[in-house]
Each structure stands twice: as C-alpha cells, then as structure tokens.
Image (cartoon, rainbow, N blue to C red):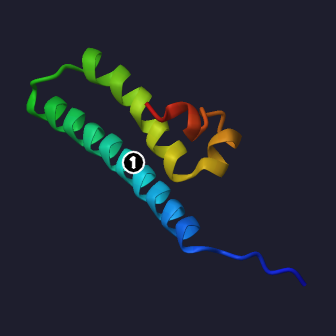
Amino acid sequence: MFIPLVTRPMIVSRSNSADAITAQIQAKQAAVSRYHTAFENGTMDDTTAGPRLKTLMPAVFASLFPEAAGFAGLPLADSLAS
C-alpha cells in the first residue's frame, strides 16, 4: 500500500488556504450582518438591502457547503471569491 508523503510546506499551504477561505466567509457574513442591521435600524431600505443580501447569502452558503452548492443550483465557491 502506498502512503503519500506529506511535507510541512504542504500542510502550511493547506492551512493558509483554509485561513483564506475562512476569512472570505467571515467577511461575507459580516456584510450580511451589516445589511441586516442597517435595514432594521431604518438606514437602508429593502430596495437597497434586498439585492445585496440576495447575492451574499448564496455566496456564504456556497463557501460553507461547496459540495451542496452545485446541487442547489447555486454558483460554486470558486466563482464567488470576489
């Protein structure tokens, strides 16, 4: 049986990738929270908040559950990295 060699740089690279993905998810979740707060405080109307939330919520979902996003008809996380 072949056991692949895992080197420290590979582990560090994966850890850095995971950290970057986590930061992207947290940024999108923070934006969702800001839009909800602005809407609830009356500083942003539903015409402005609605489309932004409609774009962000699937992006958060696709980032958290990349395997399920394709099945749900959502864009895949790779296309939502911006």
Quarter placement of the N terminus: bottom right
Q: Is residue 46 above or below residue 33?
A: above
Q: Is residue 56 above or below residue 46?
A: below
Within the image, what quadrant is residue 54 found in?
Answer: top left
Q: Nearer the viewer, residue 81 or 38?
A: 81
Q: Which residue is mark 1?
A: 25
Point out the residue furthest to the right here: 1
Indicate left or right for 20 with 43 as reference.
right
Residue 36 x %, y % = 23, 36
Indicate left or right for 13 with 73 as reference.
left
Within the image, what quadrant is residue 35 found in?
Answer: top left
Quarter placement of the C terminus: top left
Residue 18 x %, y % = 47, 58
Say which residue appears at 47% left-offset and 35% top-offset. 81
Within the image, what quadrant is residue 34 found in?
Answer: top left
Say which residue appears at 71% left-offset and 76% top-offset. 5
